Image (spheres, rainbow, N blue to C red):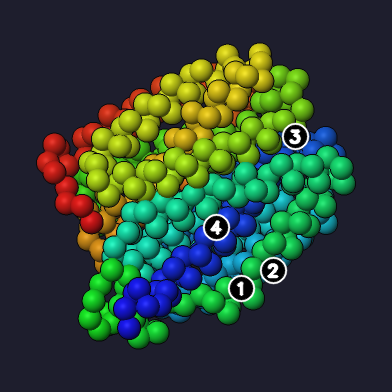
Amino acid sequence: MSGRAKLHYGWIVAAVTFVVLLCTSSIRAVPGLMMVPLQSEFGWSPAAVSSAFGLNILLYGLFGPFSVAIMDRYGMRKVLVVSLLCMGSGAACVPFLGRVWQFDLVWGVFVGLGSGATALVLAAVVAGRWFTAKRGLVLGVLTAGAAAGQMVFLPALAAIAQAAGWRAMLGMVAAMCFLLVPLVALLMRDRPADLGLAPYGEDGPPLPTRIGTGNLFTTPLKALAEGARNRDFLLLAGSYFICGATTVGLIATHLVPACIDAGIAPVVGASLLAGMGVFNMIGATASGWLSDRIDNRRLLAVYFVARGVSLLYLPFSFTSLEGLSLFAVFYGLDWIATVPPTVRLCTSIFGREKGGMMYGWVSATHQLGGATAAFLGGVARGDLGGYLEAFIVAGFTCMIAAIMVLLIGRGTRLAMA
C-alpha cells in the first residue's frame, strides 16, 4: 500500500495534535485577561497574582521531560486524556476560589501540571515518532497550532470576560478541554507500529516499538544530568530561558495590563495578542521549512536579534495603535519561530532517541524563564509603576541569547537531524 493510494495515518495524528495544541493554548492566553479583574475583585497585589501565573508556567515546563517518559510508558493517548481532564477541571474550579493560596494550588499547580503534557514537547514527540520526511515542516505547523490559539480564541475570550465576567471566560476554557477528550480517545494513536506502519517517509516494515522501562522519575533526571555536562546543551538551555522570559513570561502575561496602564481597552490589547497569533503561524511554519535547509544556529541568532529590537521599540509604541500594530507584526513573526530550530539542534546534539526528552528539559528552562519574567513583571508594575524597565532589559537579554546560540558547536557543522 503506497502513500499515494491512502493517506498515511501520521497526518491524522498530526491533525489531532494540531487541534489539541490550538485549543489548549487558550490556557496560556487567559492570564493577561484575569490579572486586573482578580486584583480588583479580591484586592490581591500584582505580585501575588503573578506568582500563581509564574508557578503555572514553571510547572508547565518542568513536567515536559517527565511527560515524555510517561508517554513512552503508557502512550500519548492516555496521557493526553488525563491532561485534558486536569486542565478542564482546574479551569472550572477557579471561579469558586477566594484565597491566594487556593489560586496558587489550582491554577499554579493543578492546571500547570495538567498542561505540561500538551506543551510543545508533544509536537516534538509526534513529529519524531510519526515522520521522517517533512519532519521540520510538520513541527513548524504543530508549533503554529499552539500560536494560532491566540488568534482563534483570545478575542472571543476577552469579549466574554468583558460582557459576562472572567468566570464565564474560564467556563468556556474548561468546556473546550472537556470536548477534546473524545476526539483524542477516538483518533490519537501512540506509534506507527501500532497500525503496522513505518513512519511517514520510510519504506519497509514498521520500526520496533520501544516501550519505556526506566524509572519514570529518574530517567528524565539522568537525561538532565547528561545535559548539564554538555556545553552545547547549556548554551541552548540558557538561550531558551531568555526566550521564555521574553515571550510567555513578559508579553503573554503583561502586554494586556501594559495596554490598560496606557489607557488602551483590554479587548484592544487582547486583539493585539491575537494578531500576533496570525503572524506566529506564518513565522513558525516558515521556520520549520527553513530549519530543514539552513544552519539552525544562525536562524536562532537572527530570531533573537529581531526580538530584541522589537522589545526595545515596544515602550515607545503605546502612543498609537499603529505603533502597537507594527510591534505585533514583527514580534509575532518571531515569537514561536525559535521552536523548530531548537528541536532540531537537540536532535542533532543528542540523537533521535534522546532528542525529545532533551528538548523537554530545554523547554523546561524556557518555562523557568517565563515564570521568572511573569513574576518580576508583576513586581515591576507594582514597585516601579509600569513596564518600561522590564521591556528594555528584556530587549538587551535577547542580544545575549543571540551570542549564546552562535557559540553552540564552536563553529562546527552540526548534522541535520
Q: Is 200 rendered above or below residue 384?
A: below
The residue carrying mark 4 is 21
Q: How many marks?
A: 4
Labels 4 and 3: the sequence-earlier one: 4
**In-image side of 378 versus 239 (left or right):** right
Tell me the kind of residue under disc 3: Val
The amino acid type, in three-letter code, at marker 4 is Leu
Q: Is residue 27 visible?
A: yes
Quadrant showing the N terminus:
bottom left
Circle 2 is placed at which residue position? 179
Q: Residue at x 31, y 78 (%)?
A: 2
Q: Which residue is mark 1?
A: 183
CB within 8 Å, label 4 to label 1? no
SS at circle 1: helix
Seen from the viewer's position, the closer of residues 102 and 392 is 392
Residue located 37% across and 78% down the image: 5
